[in-house]
Image (tube, rainbow, N blue to C red):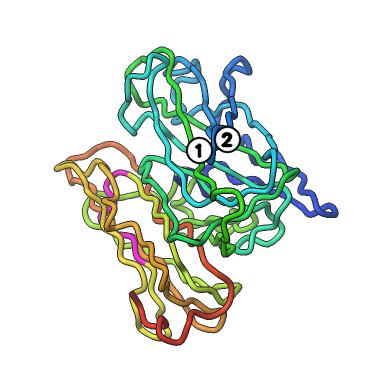
Amino acid sequence: MIHLLSALMIAAVITGTAFAESGHSDHGVPRLSDQAKTIVTYEGNTVTLTFGPVDLPSAHEGELAASMPKHVFELPEDMALVGYRSAVFTKDGTPLPRQYLHHILLINLDKESVSCPGEPLFFAGAGLEMSEARFPSGYGVKLAKGQKLMTIAAFYHGVPPTKDVMASFTMDMASKGAAVQALDVYQVGVNVVCYSQFPKRRKDETDEGIEVRPGVQVDRAPLKFRMDGCVKFAYPHGHDQVLLIALENTTARQTLLRTVPDVAPDGAFLSFPPHQVYQSTRGFGVNASDDYEVVMVHHRPLQDPHLNHGMGNYLLYMTPGQCPADSKAAP
């Protein structure tokens, strides 16, 4: 998901109710041919975005990823996003390894981010993890007819030459007329997730993440929430060699999220097993008063000569305000 959050975040300023993009959307990521198309289809309670086909690697040798042209679309009616899933494959339908996907971003240009003031809302996406998101029943992210939604997809270069590579992102919507409690979407990470904070990034951090040195590496970042909320779903994102991502309330000395991926013997990322992707109708509380910390742990084999960059992020889907009194404890 999150080459997602920092590799291609959109700098924006509020102009009335709309947002104007800055040039950061192209920062460090070469653009694939404008002939590479994005198609949006509507069927029942799903909205599917299909990207490609493209041939990989592209002509920009030495670059990590190449991005599809940005695509802006509108929904035909008010809808509520209740889950999403992604896939990467060839034009004939043959599945490809998840390493072919760099990221898919879904951004609401007409709504301001809670976690990144002055920037548009990043409300869903997927990266290397390609985990399926399914919010607890009765909850969803509300999207209005006429809002400008932007999607961006990017593919990796570090893959064998492959023709007709495609990706898809399917958004599951609530049934028409179903009662849905609105979720806010909040970004947190060890690496910087808000464009306005990019100038303050660590010296060892780039758009690709924080440099992972040989051996065990623990990285932390302090966090203050800008709202009180009750987290119902947490979508994690990490890269190869990640061993752990966590969210902790350092004031209350509580570990709120502890996410451990399944990895190959060499540390290559395989997946976040479903039981490691937090979702609960009960939820857990965060607030604007306490101090928090996001933590990520990596292990890079000592003999691995390849430079690697790591991220540890969550997209937190939360209801505003406090949790019910019986759900304040960590899950």
Residue designated by label 2: 152
Callout 2 crowding tier (Cα within 10 Å): few <14, some 14–19, many ≥20: many
Q: Residue at x 18, y 46 (%)?
A: 302
Q: Is residue 105 above or below residue 236?
A: above
Query: For the magenta stretch, what is the residue range?
Result: 240-246
- The image quarter in which residue 98 lies: top left
Q: Which mark is residue 245?
A: none
> Of label 1 and label 2, which has the lower sequence position?
1
Question: Quick check: 51 left or right of 89?
Answer: right
Mark 1 vs 2: CB contact within 8 A: yes
Q: Residue at x 83, y 52 (%)?
A: 15
Q: Residue at x 47, y 49 (%)?
A: 83
Quadrant in which the N terminus is drawn: top left
Three-letter amino acid code at the position of disc 2? Ile
Does the stretch in magenta take in 245?
Answer: yes
Looking at the image, the residue that sits furthest to the front is 177
